């Protein structure tokens, strides 16, 4: 794999560093991405995009909060197709009736406002979108971070719920025109290599260096034609883990056939970059060189070939233990070395599931490998979740399920739980291999605060099946001489026609929304004050902090319709003391009142102009994290801080645009301290428990000042340290949202 240091042109089907007579700015308009983005841009300015999407989609962790936000802001009717799927809180097994209460809320809102409702277990969000929503040249916005349909010619973006609420209120998605990076594919995968192997190889190459961060990945080159549509989809969905903004692929006869199979031939259109298209960067990847991969805990970028792991087992397990120290500190003693038996790595569980693993071809390939074999009756367990009921039905018909069940696999329905910790949580100390999207700490459902810890590695379905055939010992699919059947897919649309509620865009305002006792309105939020005083209530020095660490996934998802209830879980697996500290500031405890009086006195002595201002300032809390926001799009990572009284984050860098947007939409200031300097966290001017005073912060926002002075007050020393904070670029609407206190307040105004 080669990453180009500079930009590249695509000429005569090949990448070149320069092109005689080419105008770089004009050539950049020849990408597929440019044409789609500008088609949906309403600003009239090609560099400052204001996007209106064709369709939007959410699942049952996010749609209640989104609709509640839009309702509080004046929603009367869904102005564009809005699909509400139910694939996360599907088990209805936690918290009494609250999961199904959310589903009934979703169904009645689809009826009232004119939406589409997909019942639980029928399809995971992204599979339904692929099968029923994607169109070549279209754009879809989803409230799940893995909203990626580029392989089908649809540019899709996963964002926090606030951005979907904006679309429901006829507003726009505002972003600077992104860089576009060519992913130039050549060669053809060898038998046994699947889409997850290709995806992990790409993620390994680009995550840490930020090569595609907030950019669009455009897949081109002769290797694209060598991949089936299903294979492309499996690579595409994982592009989220690179931190790119979106993705798009050239389309061809295989994609045309895919749409025809799904009964939507008119959704197809050939997409290709124009001759001489310019890209801001390029990645060359020879598919024939990819070998079965495994992403070891605790990130998809911690990837190795399976052969490399088996050959250097103890060294790689040492590296994994070092990563565990970063995430867990001394809270637990993490090891996988106890999984080594006679020099081989034993795994306890295999899962093939969801938007990444549950596709038709992945499961057929796993069935081919396991045909006539036996997973054994030991600890190892293999669970398989097809991504939709149409896929499920075809796997029943073509015999794939028979091969899997005969080998010892368990077949389940369409459900995203194994991906985010609400299903198939392994035993304490267990090690799971999964064809799913993420393997962040505790995302598989373990709870470090309760002394429970298991871990996940990501692999392709093919190598998971090979490992299952080897009774749980880590095995690459290429070690088996499998004759892959290449079964053809047949799609039965009637499954959806019988069960999905589709309003056809017609609202029925007379329908009463069905609420449950756990569905709560957002609490009131104050506008930004002239001056701001925040207490640092958590300090995180991990190189990257995921949204799963900010607000845990898993069974906590059941409370996502209750802002105050969910907020009780904020940072619970990273900093259990955070909630108590934040609430003390929010509620103005006696201790906090005493601290503020001390801060007032200390600042007055430091600068007479500050006399009386700290006690009159807006009071709230803040967290510091080096690089927060990798992973999920769930806006609750920010909204939970807000309802606990949070007014800001302070960071050296934000891992994703979507997390920063979530902060802004909830009226929180995304402060930067020494922007981009990740080493700066080793010598901060403040610490956990300190207060930070930012005078004239409102003026900073209103007058678009590039930076502001901040003053950290240490309670123990009675000292004041002056430092500077910046906010990065903000749109005019983003400034108004922050000034109003949150998105809801802004639209009410």
Image (cartoon, rainbow, N blue to C red):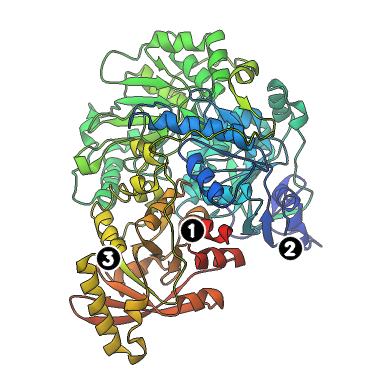
- Looking at the image, the residue that sits furthest to the front is 510
- Label 3, label 2: how many angstroms apart (C-alpha)? 46 Å
Q: Quadrant of the C terminus?
A: bottom right
* Nearer the camera: disc 3 or disc 1: 3
- Label 3, label 1: how many angstroms apart (C-alpha)? 27 Å
Q: Which is nearer the N-term, disc 3 or disc 1?
A: 3
**521 left or right of 126 in image:** left
Q: Is residue 292 visible?
A: no
Check contact, mark 2 vs mark 1: CB within 8 A.
Answer: no
Q: Which residue is mark 1?
A: 660
Q: Which residue is mark 2?
A: 45
- Looking at the image, the residue that sits furthest to the right is 21
Graded by Cα atoms within 10 Å as few (under 14), some (14 to 19) or many (20 or more), the crowding at tag 3 reads some
Q: Check the image and report above or below for 681 versus 115.
A: below
Name the secondary structure under disc 1.
Answer: helix
Q: Is residue 331 visible?
A: yes
Residue 19 on image: x %, y %: 76, 58
Residue 485 on image: x %, y %: 57, 14
Check contact, mark 3 vs mark 1: CB within 8 A.
Answer: no
Residue 566 on image: x %, y %: 35, 45
Q: Which label was assigned to residue 588?
A: 3
Q: Check the image and report above or below for 666 versus 683.
A: above
What residue is rendered at 67% in x and 57% in y? 50
């Amino acid at each position: 794999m080669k990453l180009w240091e500079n930009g590249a042109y695509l000429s005569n089907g090949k990448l070149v560093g320069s092109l005689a007579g080419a105008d770089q700015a004009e050539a950049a308009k020849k990408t597929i991405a440019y044409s789609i983005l500008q088609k949906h841009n309403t600003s009239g300015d090609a560099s400052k995009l204001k996007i209106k999407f064709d369709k939007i989609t959410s699942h049952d962790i996010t749609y209640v909060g989104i609709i509640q936000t839009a309702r509080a802001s004046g929603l009367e009717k869904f102005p564009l197709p809005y699909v509400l799927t139910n694939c996360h809180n599907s088990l209805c097994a936690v918290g009494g009736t609250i999961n199904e209460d959310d589903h009934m809320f979703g169904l009645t809102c689809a009826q009232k406002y004119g939406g589409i409702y997909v019942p639980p277990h029928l399809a995971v969000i992204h599979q339904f979108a692929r099968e029923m929503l994607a169109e070549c040249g279209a754009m879809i916005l989803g409230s799940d971070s893995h909203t990626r349909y580029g392989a089908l010619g649809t540019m899709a973006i996963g964002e926090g719920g606030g951005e979907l609420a904006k679309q429901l209120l006829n507003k726009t998605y505002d972003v600077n025109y992104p860089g576009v990076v060519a992913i130039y594919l050549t060669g053809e995968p060898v038998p046994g290599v699947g889409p997850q192997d290709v995806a992990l190889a790409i993620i390994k190459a680009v995550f840490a260096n930020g090569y595609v961060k907030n950019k669009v990945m455009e897949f081109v080159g002769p290797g694209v034609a060598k991949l089936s549509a299903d294979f492309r989809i499996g690579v595409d969905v994982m592009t989220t883990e690179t931190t790119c903004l979106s993705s798009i692929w050239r389309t061809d006869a295989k994609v045309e056939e895919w749409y025809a199979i799904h009964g939507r031939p008119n959704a197809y259109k050939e997409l290709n970059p124009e001759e001489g298209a310019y890209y801001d960067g390029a990645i060359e990847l020879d598919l024939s060189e990819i070998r079965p991969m495994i992403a070891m805990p605790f990130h998809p970028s911690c990837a190795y070939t399976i052969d490399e792991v088996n050959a250097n087992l103890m060294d790689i397990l040492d590296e994994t233990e070092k990563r565990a120290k970063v995430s867990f500190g001394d809270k637990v003693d993490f090891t996988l070395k106890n999984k080594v038996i006679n020099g081989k790595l034993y795994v306890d569980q295999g899962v093939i599931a969801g938007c990444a693993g549950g596709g038709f071809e992945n499961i057929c390939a796993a069935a081919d490998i396991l045909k006539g074999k036996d997973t054994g009756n030991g600890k190892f367990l293999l669970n398989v979740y097809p991504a939709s009921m149409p896929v499920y039905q075809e796997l029943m018909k073509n015999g794939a399920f028979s091969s899997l069940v005969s080998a010892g696999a368990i077949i389940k329905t369409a459900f995203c739980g194994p991906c985010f910790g609400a299903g198939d949580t392994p035993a304490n100390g267990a090690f799971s291999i999964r064809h799913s999207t993420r393997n962040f700490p505790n995302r598989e459902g373990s709870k470090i605060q309760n002394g429970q810890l298991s871990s996940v590695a990501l692999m392709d379905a093919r190598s998971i099946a090979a490992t299952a055939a080897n009774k749980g010992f880590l095995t690459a699919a290429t070690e088996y001489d499998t004759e892959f059947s290449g079964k053809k897919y047949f799609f039965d649309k009637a499954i959806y026609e019988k069960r999905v509620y589709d309003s056809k865009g017609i609202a029925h305002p007379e329908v009463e929304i069905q609420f449950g006792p756990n569905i709560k309105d957002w609490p009131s939020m104050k506008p930004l004050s002239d001056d701001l005083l925040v207490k640092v209530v958590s300090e995180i020095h991990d190189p990257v902090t995921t949204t799963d660490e900010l607000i845990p996934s898993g069974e906590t998802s059941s409370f996502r319709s209750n802002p105050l209830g969910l907020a009780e879980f904020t940072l619970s697996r990273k900093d259990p003391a955070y909630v108590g500290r934040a609430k003390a500031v929010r509620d103005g405890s006696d201790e906090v009142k005493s601290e503020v009086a001390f801060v007032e006195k200390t600042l007055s002595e430091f600068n007479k102009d500050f006399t009386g201002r700290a006690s009159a300032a807006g009071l709230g809390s803040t967290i510091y994290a080096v690089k927060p926001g990798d992973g999920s799009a769930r806006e609750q990572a920010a909204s939970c801080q807000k309802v606990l009284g949070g007014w800001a984050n302070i960071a050296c860098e934000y891992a994703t645009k979507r997390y920063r947007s979530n902060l802004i939409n909830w009226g929180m200031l995304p402060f930067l301290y020494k922007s981009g300097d990740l080493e700066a966290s080793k010598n901060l001017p403040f610490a956990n428990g300190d207060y930070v005073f930012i005078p004239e912060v409102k003026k900073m926002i209103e007058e678009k000042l590039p930076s502001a002075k901040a003053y950290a007050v240490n309670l123990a020393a009675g000292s004041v340290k002056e430092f500077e904070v910046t906010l990065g670029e903000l749109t005019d609407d983003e400034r108004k949202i922050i000034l109003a206190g949150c998105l809801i307040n802004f639209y009410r105004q």
